Amino acid sequence: MNKNKNVWIFIDYPLSRPWAFFLGLNNASKNFQFTLIKMATTKQEEEAFKYEKNNFLDSSVRVLTIRSTLEYLTLLKMKNGIIIDLTVSNRWFYIFLNKYLRKNSSIYIKFAMAILPLGESIGAKKKLTSFRKYSKVIRLIKRKIFSIFALYDYVFFAGDDGKHYFPKRFIEAKSIASFDYLNYVNYLNKIKEDDRDSIKYALLIEENLVDDPDFLITNDTGVKNTYYACMYDCLKSLEKMTGLPVKVLPHPKSDLSRLENVFHGFEILKVETAAAISGAEFVITHFSTAISYALLADKPILLLDVPHLKDDMRRVMMRISNILGLRTFYADELLRGFMETISLANIDESRKNDYISSYIFGKNANPMTIREILEYVQNIR
């Protein structure tokens, strides 16, 4: 059988360290030639790649950046390889690319490895402006076209609900373990009791919301600064209520120098996510996918709602709250003296296990490595 040696990984957002490690790009296999293809043809994508940190990539990994429609033509030379599609935007050209590359004997793979519960409606819907109605209709049309025409050979998803994040057209879907699960198991295998931090602390899972216009109400600098000021005050209040110091675990794409400035006085951790969360008494977050580590480590979770989040993001937070039976804490409660102390209970075992099987490690999941996945799709092609 003619094996596909070329592996092309399409991204339209900076690749995070967990993704890079899961894909083996930090220590690339000699059996495959990996090429990272960055789709940066829009202003938003170009801005996002400014915060890219890829110093963890193996020197053998090739990097190709597509900045214009004309440069798309270079992709048409690709034949007899494996496509790993990690793009998040529904671009018209991707349909053509999907069709063309599959026609040229390429294997097309899609992943859903770090997912959150889909948000549900929270009360009366706001009246949409004509522009927002138009934009929403266009997005729905594009999504429908993708569900009809985009065809993946294989989709790999974490958790039993992961399959619902794909269009219905694929040849085979396979449940595997999320890379959070794999990283946590790897951490447990190498950790020694002496390595654990003896000082108790609470942990903020920082989510880099200010660099993503999809999360905050507006991308205005003033709102960014107000968001950070609110978070700083909330953390100070939590320290007073719990008697625990709060440490900050930065998002992989965050600007550390900025965080050290806006969270001055708080320790910014530079350790693995699994280690930071396992050592904490409880974690603080809005809706980070890293809550999977907190669930696996059996840590209490404080969901923090602040005024600067978009409604879509707040719906995701409330969905998490409903599934896990967690109370959502509002910034006003922490900042206006409504509470003198705060008490967090461990999550109900049944709820926790349901969340893990739905979004982290499905009941029939197979914890496959990237090499096992690549060999699997070639052998059954």
Image: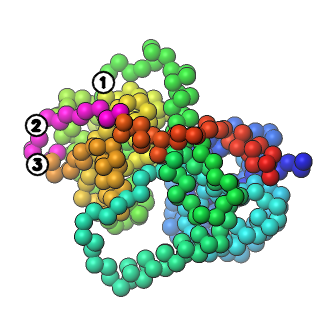
* Residue 338 or residue 62, whichever sits in front: 338
Residue type indicated by callout 3:
Arg
Residue 200 circle label? 1
Residue numbers of the magenta segment: 334-349
Q: CA distance from mark 3 to mark 2?
A: 10 Å
- Whole-percent x, y for residue 143 in the image: 54, 71
Which residue was labeled with disc 3?
A: 336
Up the image or down, 4 lies above or below 219; here it is above
- Cβ–Cβ under 8 Å for marks 1 and 3: no
Q: Residue at x 45, y 29 (%)?
A: 275
* Residue 36 or residue 325, whichever sits in front: 325
Q: Quadrant of residue 240?
A: top left
Which residue was labeled with disc 2?
A: 340
* SS at mark 3 in the image: loop
376 left or right, relative to 346:
right
379 left or right, relative to 43:
right
- Whole-percent x, y for residue 127 in the image: 28, 78
Evaluate whether residue 350 shows in this view.
yes
Residue type indicated by callout 2:
Glu
